[in-house]
Amino acid sequence: MRSMFEDLRYALRSLNQRRGIPLLMVVTLAAGIGATTAVFNLVNALILRPLPYRAPERLVTLHETRQSKGSVFDPIAPLNLRDWRQETRVFEAVGAFARADFNLNLDERPEWVQGARVEASLFPLLGVWPILGRGFAVEEDRPGGDHHVALLSHALWQERFAGDPAAIGRRLRLDGVEYEVIGVMPAHFGFPEWARLWTPLALDPDSSRRGERSLNAMARLAPGVTLGQAQSALDEVAHRLAARYPETNRGSGAEALRLGDELMPREARLGLVLLLGAAAFVLLIICSNSTALLTVRIMARWKEIAVRAAWEPGAAGSCASSLPRASSSSWAPARSPSARRSPRSASCSRRCRSRSRSGSASISIAPC
């Protein structure tokens, strides 16, 4: 233990004498490790960590495409979405939603809130349920009903109701219409990502024109159906609709994208992976340079290290081991004056005797 503290004290003293190299190593290593960690956390959050939904690999987003706009994704016309549902068998469930902004008024405290109107099938499709209360019932999503109910995000529940479970059943006004709070969604859940409040979509496709494109949609692939098969089925329906309704659907198509690719395109994923590789390579270079600096410093101090090693108490054993030893058969109490010893043995003997007389670790410059 004493030797360890002495080594630690010597190391601190040595670092204090030459501050430049240690400071440079600490700064470069901290920068390299910090950059690599930051990039890895980004890659982990956007690529490696699975989406917080049930079987996310089977979730796809649906879009209309317009060839006249270079296959740009457009919102979906409600009538087209109805035909996609009826004329395909590749989806287990389909859920539509549309953005909606509300003027929330609760306890005479008005607030503008971003939200969405969603079909009752959307949250079960994602595999997400409220942590408090219940979700939308099918009858509450039917057009023409008077079911004014709302789901709150976890953040909005904490802000406006202070996390009180008694918020279920409370009433609030949205755009001047009274709604009943029926549930609270889990923390960190946001779908769409901007939504803090949800109400039923209650859509009647027959009340809209085919050219009115206002919806977004999610779908879950049926068991055993691949994304390619789903896309082929959508292409067939889109061709039939284009022939059936040329005024509104000529040049229109349908596109299904995996939810993961929608949130993080493959080009962006490749860029992040390359960035992580570059950061790791830079960290490797920094570690190599730090090792080289330490090696150069050790080589510059090898003489000092040799002298310190000779000062250690173990040097006495080196002297003793170098003295000539006689066998028991040739041992005599008195050595003949004519007996000669080598100069090296005599020198070691003198040093060892000096060590024993002083009672402390006598110092020799190098072990015998």
Image (spheres, helix red, strand yellow):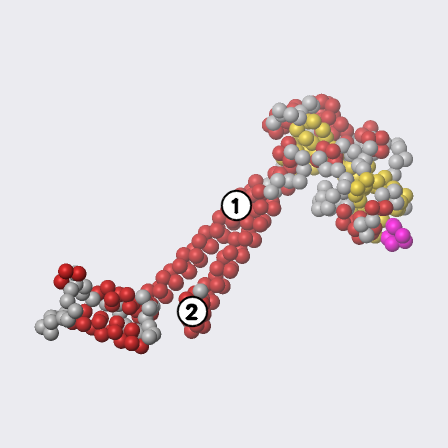
User: Which kind of residue does numbered mark 2 sit on?
Assistant: Glu
Which of the pair 308/288 is nearer the observer?
308
Q: Position of residue 172 (x, y in %)?
A: 88, 46
Amino acid type for the residue under numbered disc 1: Val
Q: Quick check: 231 left or right of 137?
A: left
Q: Earlier in the sequence, mark 1 or mark 2?
A: 2
* Residue 107 within the magenta-colored segment of the rendering: yes
Q: Residue at x 62, y 25 (%)?
A: 225
The region drawn magenta spans 105-110
Which residue bears the numbered disc 2? 6
SS under mark 2: helix
In this rendering, the answer to whether 288 lies above or below 222 is below
- Residue 163 is left or right of residue 46, and the answer is right
Q: Nearer the viewer, residue 278 or 318?
A: 318
Pointer 1: residues within 10 angstroms few (<14), some, or many (20+)? some
Residue at 57% from the left image edge and 47% from the top image edge = 43
258 to 41, vertically: above or below: above
Q: Is residue 101 magenta?
A: no
The quadrant in which residue 332 appears is bottom left
One can see residue 239 in this view: no
Q: Residues within 10 Å of mark 2 (few under 14, many from 20)?
A: few
**With 57 as the anchor, is 140 left or right in this view?**
right
Nearest-to-viewer mark from 1 and 2: 2
- Judged by its main secondary structure, the magenta piece is strand
Which disc number belongs to residue 273? 1
At 87% from the left and 39% from the top, the residue drawn is: 148
Indicate the secondary structure of the residue bearing disc 1: helix
Q: Position of residue 25 (x, y in %)?
A: 45, 63
Mark 1 to mark 2 CA distance (whole Å): 47 Å
In front of the other: 248 or 53: 53
Q: Residue 124 vs residue 8: left or right?
A: right
Tell me the quarter of the picture where residue 132 sits: top right
